[in-house]
Amino acid sequence: MNFAKKINDWRKYRETINELGRMSDRELSDLGIGRADIRRVARSAVGF
């Protein structure tokens, strides 16, 4: 994997964490995500 792709993946991971972190517990629940699951969901979304 090249360096640029790693940087891009890391940015997507951080953006996903930030977006999910701004959501209320109710909104996360509607998506089937617990607050403790945000990092796991972000990792799987990016492919880490």
Image (cartoon, rainbow, N blue to C red):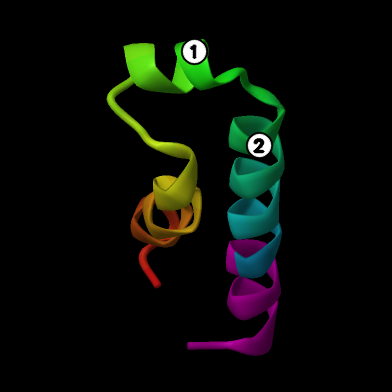
The tally of labels here is 2
Q: Quadrant of residue 24?
A: top right
Q: Residues within 10 Å of mark 1 (few under 14, many from 20)?
A: few
Give the answer, above or below, for where 45 lies relative to 34: below
Is 40 colored magenta in this rendering? no
Magenta-tinted stretch? 1-9
Compared across the picture, whether 21 is left or right of 39 comes to: right
Q: Which residue is more in the foreground, 25 or 43?
A: 25
Residue flagged by tag 2: what amino acid is it? Gly
Secondary structure, mark 1, is helix
Give the answer, above or below, for where 46 lies relative to 27: below
Give the answer, above or below, for where 11 lies relative to 18: below
Residue at point 62%, 53% (across, down): 12
Residue flagged by tag 1: what amino acid is it? Glu
According to the picture, the residue beneath numbered tag 1 turns out to be 27
Q: Which residue is more in the foreground, 46 or 31?
A: 31
Q: Which residue is more in the foreground, 30 or 16?
A: 30
The earlier-in-sequence mark between 1 and 2 is: 2
Magenta segment, prevailing SS (helix, strand or loop): helix
According to the picture, the residue beneath numbered tag 2 turns out to be 21
